[in-house]
Image (cartoon, coloured by chain):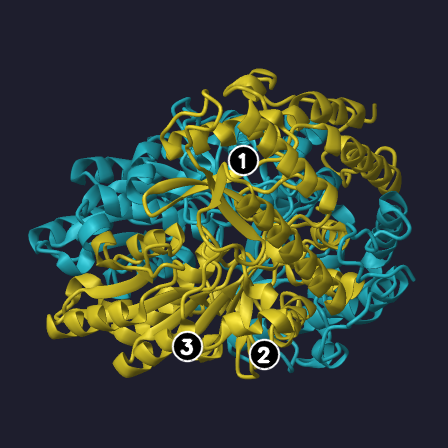
Chain colours: A cyan, B yellow
Amino acid sequence: MESRKAPNAPRRAAEPDGFVPAATRVARWIEDYRRHLPDLPVLSRVAPGDVAAALPEAPPELPEAWEAILADLDETVVPGLTHWNHPGFMAYFCSTSADPGVLAEFVAAAFNVNAMLWRTSPAATELEERMVDWTRRFVGLPAGFGGVIQDTASTSTFVALLAARHAALPFARERGLGGATAGPGRVYGSELAHSSLDKAVIAAGLGHRNLVRIEVDQAYGLRSEALDGALRGDRAAGRVPVMVCATIGTTSCASVDPVDAIADVCARHGVWLHVDAAYAGPAAALPELRSRFVGWERADSIVLNPHKWMSVPLDCSLLLSRRLDVFRASLALTPEYLASDSVATNLMDVGLALGRRFRALKLWFVFRREGAEGIRAMIRRHCELARAFADRVEAEPRLELAAPPSFGTVCFRAVPSDRGPANLVRDACAATRQLLERVNRDGRVFLSHTELDGRYAARLVVGGAHTGPAHLEAAWDSVTAALND
Amino acid sequence: MESRKAPNAPRRAAEPDGFVPAATRVARWIEDYRRHLPDLPVLSRVAPGDVAAALPEAPPELPEAWEAILADLDETVVPGLTHWNHPGFMAYFCSTSADPGVLAEFVAAAFNVNAMLWRTSPAATELEERMVDWTRRFVGLPAGFGGVIQDTASTSTFVALLAARHAALPFARERGLGGATAGPGRVYGSELAHSSLDKAVIAAGLGHRNLVRIEVDQAYGLRSEALDGALRGDRAAGRVPVMVCATIGTTSCASVDPVDAIADVCARHGVWLHVDAAYAGPAAALPELRSRFVGWERADSIVLNPHKWMSVPLDCSLLLSRRLDVFRASLALTPEYLASDSVATNLMDVGLALGRRFRALKLWFVFRREGAEGIRAMIRRHCELARAFADRVEAEPRLELAAPPSFGTVCFRAVPSDRGPANLVRDACAATRQLLERVNRDGRVFLSHTELDGRYAARLVVGGAHTGPAHLEAAWDSVTAALND
């Protein structure tokens, strides 16, 4: 082994075999993993502590061979994974990931540039701005929406809330909310708005109780007249509306808030409208689904996650806004060591993180290798497969839809019935929970759950880049087998 | 070309040549890029808009070939990069990145798992916890410190501030800071504390003016007696101390705050102590540098970035704390759809982001391929090279050190002199600025700047995984050439 301690020699020992052979070996390992993937249970079967028990307590002092690392990937890591790229992964919202995005991450890690300032990599900044604009065009939003790529929707929504806070409570940046002479700032979302909104409200110092949950209608869309009433009441009581979050594609059941009506309400009350389209946003690229997005072009800010439904690996969340100047006013500051004479955009000004990975690269690779039409075709296929699954649920007397199927998402539950098998307990929640446990233990697919109207529901989302009819067939087999168990 | 529109077939067109050939082609491209890297100017020479002008305004409708994409990488992206992995990159703090970390990112993107919950990939959670613990041992912190991996130090510090806010102002989570009956919450850092602290204070709703900048001593370390005075004064005035941020390795000049004395002050006043060791933290693994970290084991929270000095690509920031329960109390909430019966840890509870990449993988690969001793050897080499450069600065009458050299960081400035070349203007700031411009135009190395005592200073950081004596020689050549210009 070559000496690793020579203090004055650039260290190269990490690549004894050269970079390309090592990368090729890793690529072959990945291909092998993928080949076996369909035979692996989607949801990991390890018990808490199993993986940790297989890992040494301290790091090695000396380098180990690639063989040892790849063997440990096989023996320790893979059994401990819940396989998000498995075609049978139908839980949560899938994080789709196809080859162009994976290879882009490989290149981005090799570049390892930081897109904090324009000058710290002009191409990273300008490609990011262009990818934001490509996506804007792709989903049919008007010019005037600019944006940045954040890591996740949680961050995008939080940063949007900071901008909205700045618009409503401009003293907060300098004096803090504790110095308020006005009443408390209030934030509004439906009962189904994502939990990242709760975290954002807490983190921003507004207080969790100032997140107002507005009731939903039968289709689980926010009741805009209830929102209007809440805003009126708060204004009358001296409270300060800060932001309304409308959702297109809720996490619970992919329901759609009436954004156009909500935009009317927001305009009337002068409140910042944030649209959470983290999941469903890319579907706006399909003409047949455009009607579900009416009004979102009136939003002050929008979040849309390419890592959810555009074949881009985690993490890649687009934050779009017509008011980026307010984002900058809410957060930007430039310490001397980052001062530059550049007139160009410094994307660190629109967000908390200073270190910014070259995330635009994967969006670029995906757009170019898939084509806009390829992405649309994938989303269309997912929606059709979900619709077909929902039809089967409707035709099965022992099951019922828990919400209207929406985009690639189907929520359903067991119907407790005297005619049902004796081991299906009467209570629908317990029955559904048991059904889900059986399906996930079976391992061919992985479904998650939600709660709708206070009732437990199983939840299936078609969103994997490689998910096809056979996998939905497996899902149905698994569900019916569980029903018959 | 195969049809990409078949709605019922899993789409495979992204990999017409198979994954391994495509990955190998990309790996060869990366190797080629690296081969040419030493000949490229470190700082990009494009003008604002150059890269954007080379990019189409809209995404392609149909897939393009890898050849076209790789050609565009060469023609459009590479000239627009500031090459952070260039051995001549000596600006800011380097984000070191060697092969094991790059290949780990490749694997992580292929897995594309989300480590939000234990069950959503047990191995990602347990490997993350173990890598946090390996790093804790590596830098010699006592057991009792646990933690998570965040994206960047900005996020780690922000989340630490939320925990500290919860400890000091526990009503804030529910009622918000606007409902305060207490005085405003205050945060303390030295004049050289990082700007992410400003952003954190603003974002948390505490107000920028409640960030108290404490004066520094001649070595640019925070004056602990001044901190004590500020805390006394604030307490007496009814203000509420929330957090003190001490820095080991400031961004400006890598100076070290007297953490042990600061910990005494914090203990006396009952204030949360956060230590920002984002840059220098890994150097605690070197016995000869341990004395600079005395007292950090008394911190409530510590941030340390493996992506800065442990050969791990962006982003990988360790947030360590003895009080993770307070972090959870400040932010955790579990919506129904994420509820699980698991007794295991759900890392999403310690942070804002729900989507969490499998960042532990790269730390694991690096520890194993480099060995703890390999990482120590690299850091030692960097510090020695920086010290040698500082010696040259001291020996050169036309230059002076602007701060004591510290870790891998050297700050220096031009000494305006009658004996100097006529085109060096008298004012030292202007002269140093001009010197830096010449060096960066030369292109062999890239240095950044800072301000110390209100005076402009050039700043050189040795931190690249492949930076060796030859590159410091080039830096010195470039600086002296600029002096003689």
Residue depth check, mark 2 versus mark 1: number of the one nearer the observer: 1
Q: What secondary structure is marked by label 1?
A: loop
Q: CA distance from mark 1 to mark 3?
A: 36 Å
Residue depth check, mark 1 versus mark 3: number of the one nearer the observer: 3
Q: CA distance from mark 2 to mark 3?
A: 35 Å
Residue shown at 35% from the left, 51% from the top: B199
**Residue matched to label 3:** B260
Q: CA distance from mark 2 to mark 1?
A: 40 Å
- The residue lying furthest to the front in this view is B419
> Same chain, marks 1 and 3?
no
Q: Give me the disc on residue B8.
A: none
Q: Are marks 2 and 3 in contact (CB under 8 Å)?
A: no
Label 2 resides on the chain identified as: B
In the rendered structure, which amino acid carries the disc numbered 2?
A: Ala
> Same chain, marks 2 and 3?
yes
Q: What secondary structure is marked by label 3?
A: helix
- Eyeballing the image, is A239 above or below B45? below
Q: Quadrant of the N terminus of chain A?
A: bottom right
> Same chain, marks 2 and 1?
no
In terms of sequence position, does the residue under pointer 2 or pointer 3 come before the other?
3
Report the side of A397 relative to B25 (left or right): left
Q: Give me the disc on residue B344.
A: 2
In the rendered structure, which amino acid carries the disc numbered 1?
A: Thr
In the rendered structure, which amino acid carries the disc numbered 3?
A: Asp
